[in-house]
Amino acid sequence: MSGALFVTAAMSIFTFLNLVPADHSGSLWMIYAAHWALIIGLLVVAFRRGSETMRLREHLLKSQQAELAFREKAINEHAMILTTDSEGKILSVNENFTNALGFRANGLRGSELRHFLGAADSAPYEAIARQTNGGDVWSGDLEVLSASGKLRILRTTAVPLFSTGIGHLKTMYFCNDVTKQRSGEQERQLTRCLQLLPEDVYLVDMDSGKILFMNDAALRRMRWPVGEYRTYGADRLPDPFGAAIRDLCAQETPTDASETLQFQTECYGVAMEANVQIIETVDGQKRFVAVLRDISQRMEAEATRRNFMSMMTHELRTPLTSIKGAVQLLTAGTAGPLEPGVMSLLRIAENNGERLLGLVNDILDLSKLEAGKMEFTMGRMDLRALIDEAIESDAGYATGLGVTLRCKSPETPLWVTGDKGRLLQVLTNLMSNAAKFSETGSQVEITARPNGDMIRVAISDRGPGIPEAARAGLFEPFKQAGAQDKGRIKGTGLGLTIVKAIVEHHDGRVDFVSELGKGTTFYFDLPQCAQSTKPRQSALERAA
């Protein structure tokens, strides 16, 4: 503007000198001087206004720069910031980001954000890329691993930056670590649910052994102040329950989180059943959730039931034994000759009396096993010789069913430590079951041989086999091992339960394999002991 005024003034002077007559030059020069003074005044005003405008522009620019710096500082103080190029390579990270996750900035620059978020699951990165490449802002939670390997949850907003003619330049990620918040929400939801349970509930940190939560039922039993239990550790829990929890916390290889530990214990003299489950928080912290259920009344009821069953079976066995003996005397002709029809009825009575006495004996054995009162007299014995004795004992029963028993094992002693009578009970039970479910004219095979540091005895039949649906409950009381449509004698359903208990008492195991229409093989393993140089004596030799 000042330049234009100067040009205008020069042109006006030039024009004035050419047009003004010489005789009027004095008065006109005065007019011209006033005109020039006006122009100079205008120039001064224009210059001052220009300077003021420049100062205002500079002030505004500095204010804007200060505002931007303030905003950047505020954002950097509050958020974790990461910047990538349009291809997803990390350009920069702020100090909050490196401090929170434990990485070094130089180690992150140039790396792919895809791998940083987890190469195993690239779905989050693909979702971010689709939105930011299209110019949209993405918001959500990202799960990342810190430098120490711990899971962190970052609440993130990804903002793309575009330039006209160039396109997508870079993307800025504004993140906040919400791991503790999410973990706290998860724990609050868990404790609200646990508080509703009527059983005693404890939440214990696996690493420190610190008690994190107790529901009202547990606090009432412990009689601890509500506000103080969080300062206690598992060492304050009464033994043996407290000892069990401390042992679990001390394990170098902790129990799998998918497994539930169940055991019986006591708490202040009350019989309890403990169920312990491992849970993991969103930030990788592991906890024990222990639920204690009072089973004292259930145990009293079980004891009452066992005592009743034991008393009942004892009371039944005595008269049944007398009835059986009397019938056997009659069928033996002790009371004189009997009519054929009477003899047939006595045979029926004898068979059913024998069956009933077997049921009573099985119930009595099961009651003893449940109560832990079954007596075992352990000694060293040759299992191969015991098999011969069992075959000799069951041969008559098998012959009556049209089945033969045959041992196909070498005549080699197989030494084990066990109760002879109880192991004989196992063998005769499995052999009679095999004979019962075998076709008439078939053969039951018995084998015995070393199997690692165990000795395996297997009894195989050629019966109908066991359906897959029956496998799970086969060793439970009152379950049958096979179909009952062949006209065979039905059993009590307790034999396999007793067999399993006896074998497990000898530190062994029992199981079976079966194929429908082809037969079943039951087998049991017992720990073998050292060999003996004493020759084996067969059952026939001992009887001679």
Image: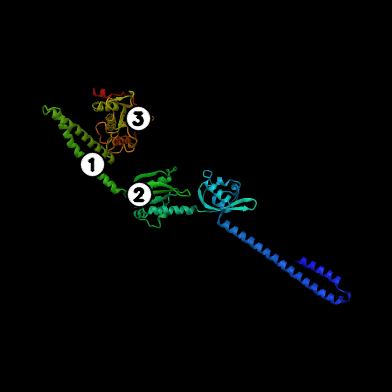
Mark 2 and mark 1: Cα distance apart in space: 29 Å
**Residue at image x 80%, y 69%?**
9
Compare marks 2 and 1 and give the one earlier in the sequence.
Answer: 2
Label 1 Cα neighbours within 10 Å, binned few <14 / some 14-19 / many ≥20: some
Instruction: Classify the position of the C terminus by image quarter.
Output: top left
Please name the residue that numbered disc 3 is placed on. Answer: 456
Q: Between residues 55 and 72, which one lies in front from this camera angle?
A: 55
The kind of residue tagged 2 is Leu
Q: Where is residue 487 shown, x and y percent of the image?
A: 24, 31
Quadrant assignment, res 367: top left
Instruction: Classify the position of the N terminus by image quarter.
Output: bottom right
Please name the residue that numbered disc 2 is placed on. Answer: 292
**Residue at image x 25%, y 42%?**
306
The kind of residue tagged 3 is Arg
User: What is the count of numbered marks?
Assistant: 3
Label 3 Cα neighbours within 10 Å, binned few <14 / some 14-19 / many ≥20: many
Q: Between residues 278 and 56, which one lies in front from this camera angle?
A: 56
Mark 2 and mark 3: Cα distance apart in space: 40 Å
Mark 1–mark 3 CB contact (< 8 Å): no
Up/down of 90 relative to 541, above or below: below
